[in-house]
Amino acid sequence: MRKNIKNITAITFAAVMMVISSQHVLAQSSIPLTVGPARQQLTINPGETANFAIKYYNQSEIPLSGAVNVADFVVDSSDGSPRIIDNIDQANPKFTASKWVTLSMEQITIAPNDRVIVTGSLSVPKDARPGGRYVSVYFEPSVGTPSTVGTDNGATGVSPRIASLLYIRVNGPITENAFISNMFAKSFYEYGPIEVTAHITNSGDYHVRPRGVFTLTNPLGGVVEQSSLKEANIFPDALRIFTASVGEKWMMGQYKITLNALYGEKAQVMERSVYVWVFPWRVALVVLLTLIILGIIAKAVYKNIIVKEASLEEELSEERKEIEKLKKQLGKRE
């Protein structure tokens, strides 16, 4: 059966711990446990079976007991955090596969500083729809164990979960459709750099991981700067937010920011642009006022000089007239 599996890629993160609650990923946990691999990608044909293994490491000095469960998960938050679906009736059957998974153990006890390997099999129905399915295999400690998250009053009653995620791709024709559903930035900036935000939505059958760049061009069309799009998975029926900061502090005019990205097996293209005005108006106002003041001063100085010159010219003219008059008077006497 193994030869029918095209790829079973384990992305192993040593000492990576994913703590998932029934609603959201918990920020912290007191569980001294790690799981590996944190994620596995399984590619399989309809009607076939694939095997996988998950290792749970107890890093504490006491034994840990609990249940190993299977549940579907979704990534419907804009930051890419997974959310376990406890009630399968609330999940979209298009992307569920927890019913296809059988585990070798459902209750385990892990000795101090030891590990337990839980194996599982994934049996895909012959009529399974091609596309992505997303399943989590998680360890949930028994109530009352030291691994339960506590408060000042004792245990909260909500056990943290340490999960390994299975990304399952059922072979066959699938639809890949991702697009930039929104892209925006403030319409006006006094100074750069410019903060731009893009929303990318995946309405296809399988998760995608776009690659692209934000490009900033000046009013003349020249490229000012490019910033790479952060690579991240976007799951089906989900939206993910990407941000970038482009440009320098001193800019002036209308700038264009364009996001160009490729996604999927066929390297499909998505593109969207937004325009932003940048103008350091306060600096410009100070410069303008300075020029006005200098102009007024220059005009006053100019007028003062012209007036003085005109006055001197008038005095000289009067003196010349007096001299000429005196000359005439002296001429008559002679």
Image (tube, rainbow, N blue to C red):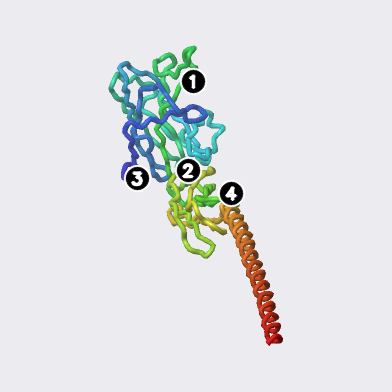
Label 1 sits on a secondary structure element that is loop
Residue at 52% x, 65% y is 220
Residue at image mark 4: 186
In front of the other: label 2 or label 4?
A: 4
Contact check, label 1 and label 3, Cβ < 8 Å: no
Q: Amino acid at mark 1?
A: Val
Whether residue 57 appears in this view of the structure is: yes
Asked which quadrant contains residue 63, the reply is top left
Question: Residue 187 at what x, y percent from top left?
Answer: 60, 51
In front of the other: label 4 or label 1?
A: 4
- Residue 132 badge: none
Q: How many numbered marks does the figure carry?
A: 4
Residue at image mark 1: 158
Q: Amino acid at mark 4?
A: Lys
Whether residue 277 appears in this view of the structure is: no
Label 3 sits on a secondary structure element that is strand
Distance from label 2 to label 1 (Cα)?
Answer: 35 Å
